[in-house]
Amino acid sequence: MHEILPNRLWLGNAGNAADMVAVVEAGVAAMVDLATEISPPPVLRSMVYLRFPIHDGDGNRPELLRLAVQTVTALIRDRTPTLVFCAAGMSRSPAVTAHAMALAEGRNPKECLRQIVAGRPHDVSPVLWQALERLFS
């Protein structure tokens, strides 16, 4: 789990999301799950949990992608401490979060993506990125 916006936004993978001790210690209040292939993690009753089953490749419903990005955008704007995660934390979570940050902060999504992945392993699906660009450009 790595912090993108201090005390407000983290990206991670399924293992990070399942570590409730670390999630709680970080101060996370909302979890956004973008994975289709894993079971939902255990979530505290007091925590907001949102699941958007997105694929890395083609075949995502545009309305689901739009809703995922708009939801993360709202959480960023509301300053809700949020963990965005997918199975490996290297494609869906950075792609969706980059577009959400761009909308929330009036920035370019590619610039946001560069900030998010700087010095970290990543493998953003070009097909997913193009689908998001079509929706938000």
Image (cartoon, rainbow, N blue to C red):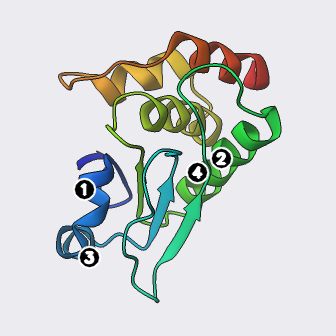
What residue is shown with label 1? 16
Closer-to-camera residue (18/107):
18
Q: Amino acid at mark 4?
A: Val
The CA distance from mark 3 to mark 1 is: 11 Å
Vertical position of residue 42 compared to residue 71: above or below: below
Task: Kindly identify which numbered label has been placed on residue 72.
Answer: 4
Residue at screen point 59% across, 55% down:
77
Expressed as whole percent of the image width and height from the top left, the position of residue 5 reads 35, 48
Expressed as whole percent of the image width and height from the top left, the position of residue 124 reads 43, 19
The CA distance from mark 4 to mark 1 is: 18 Å
What residue is shown with label 3? 24
What residue is shown with label 2? 68
Question: Do the residues under discs 4 and 2 have CB atoms within 8 angstroms?
Answer: yes
Q: Amino acid at mark 2?
A: Ala
Closer-to-camera residue (86/97):
86
First in sequence: mark 4 vs mark 1: 1
Q: Secondary structure at mark 4?
A: helix
Residue at screen point 58% across, 58% down:
51
